[in-house]
Amino acid sequence: MPGAADDARFMAEAIELSLRHLGQTGTNPSVGCLIVKDGVIVGRGVTAKGGRPHAEPQALAEAGEQARGATAYVSLEPCSHHGKTPPCADAFIAAGIARAVVAVTDPDERVSGRGLRMLQDAGIEVTMGVLEAEARRALAGYLTRQTKGRPYVILKLAVSADGMIGRKGNGQVAITGPLARRQVQLLRAETDAILVGIGTARADDPELTVRLEGLEQRSPVRIVLDRDLALPLTSKLVQTARDIPLIVVCDAPQVAVSKSGEGGQGVDALATRRAALAARGVEVLEASNLESLLFALASRGISSLVVEGGARVAADFLAADLVDEIQFYRGDVVVGDDGIAAPVTLESIPPAFRALHSLRFGPDRLDVFERA
Ligand SMILES: NC(=O)c1ccc[n+]([C@@H]2O[C@H](COP(=O)([O-])OP(=O)(O)OC[C@H]3O[C@@H](n4cnc5c(N)ncnc54)[C@H](OP(=O)(O)O)[C@@H]3O)[C@@H](O)[C@H]2O)c1
């Protein structure tokens, strides 16, 4: 019988495996599963792209007859309900698994605790909570959408040595080096959606895609907060909208009407711009505030969102208490005069967050904070 150290080692491997399909499993969580017999891994599975098949039947299929009497390590409680696939708990029972080690209970009300009970009722020994914190981090998108009805929100900021995130009227300013920028691309590849404000879209004309070799197909859905639908039709975002989804978020109608009453944008002009964007493959979404936007995104299956700025949007997300993790990059570039001040500094990270870890990418440093 494996000891606690072996359990932790195999669970770490199962969690590592689960990360492979992060951001690619639709509304299903990306789960990792190992089948271990006499200290040897005889089966591995990760939720397939698109969300099916689940990790467990794949690991069992690889293990074959060796699954009988083996231990299964799985990052999330096996499902207990008949959905589009039969319950994974039944698959463990049928294969003769002797022991199941599970990191996290599934908050899905169709499963929550039932999967574990099915295993126990069938005489399978169940050990819960092994590397739970690590698995929760790997499953953060799924768990946040299930429990809060919104995506897991990561605020990513790159801040210069003098506390700036850019320069007024200057377009994109390189604050970090190539290694850190590749790391940000990797984050995009693991995330369902990425969001910026119209200020950033206009100043930087970004593409917000993944350009890492081999991962080009993993660009997230791109979202721009743009009350007045001012995003230029010539922008790279609009020009690529037919290949990679682009959502432009404007105010809900009653807000737009009252704004036009104050001498703001007319409703007719908005309708014209909306039609022009739609004709280029852009989806226009109405939302009255950030919270309702996040609920709308979750309801269409988006479980994780990177907010990449700019200053105003980052400040709005923090003020609305809608950030779950802050990724704070510090470069040694000095922006100087006309800099745009960072909405938050290392000294002013809200007390609701605690430091998770720090990493170095060449000359740049990344500090990651998560909700305490
Ligand atoms: N270093 C970094 O990490 C980083 C990352 C991204 C961008 N940047 C830099 O940041 C600068 C842009 O920052 P910024 O503060 O000017 O612009 P921004 O934050 O990108 O966009 C602000 C705009 O977004 C709109 N907006 C904000 N909240 C909204 C909401 N809840 N709903 C709808 N619209 C909303 C605002 O419209 P209203 O005015 O109508 O409210 C405002 O015009 C650029 O220079 C860029 O290079 C730096």
Image (cartoon, rainbow, N blue to C red):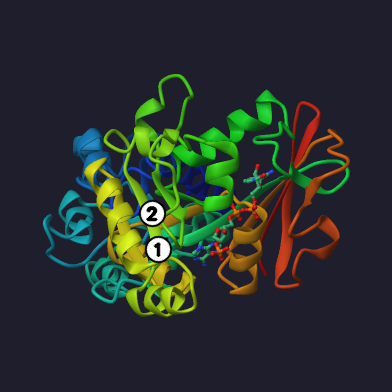
341 displayed left or right of 101: right
Determine crowd level at label 2: few under 14, some 14-19, many 20+ residues with C-alpha closer than 10 A.
many
Name the one closer to the observer, 41 or 306. Answer: 306
Residue at x-position 72% and y-position 27%: 177
**CB contact under 8 Å: marks 2 and 1:** yes
Could you tell me which secondary element the residue under label 1 belongs to? strand
Asked if ligand 1 lies within 8 A of label 1, the reply is: yes
Identify the residue position indicated by label 2 in the image. 248
For residue 173, above or below residue 106: above
For residue 230, above or below residue 267: above
Q: Quadrant of residue 209?
A: top left
Determine crowd level at label 1: few under 14, some 14-19, many 20+ residues with C-alpha closer than 10 A.
many
Q: Quadrant of residue 174?
A: top right
Q: Position of residue 325 (x, y in %)?
A: 61, 59
55 displayed left or right of 311: left
Q: Position of residue 292 (x, y in %)?
A: 40, 74
Q: Which mark is residue 214?
A: none
Q: How many marks?
A: 2
Amino acid of disc 2: Val
Name the one closer to the observer, 58 or 331. Answer: 331
Could you tell me which secondary element the residue under label 2 belongs to? strand
Asked if ligand 1 lies within 8 A of label 2, the reply is: no
Identify the residue position indicated by label 1 in the image. 250
Residue sticking out furthest to the front:
263
Write down which quadrant ligand 1 falls in.
bottom right
Amino acid of disc 1: Cys
Distance Cα–Cα, label 2 vs label 1: 7 Å
Name the one closer to the observer, 58 or 259. Answer: 259
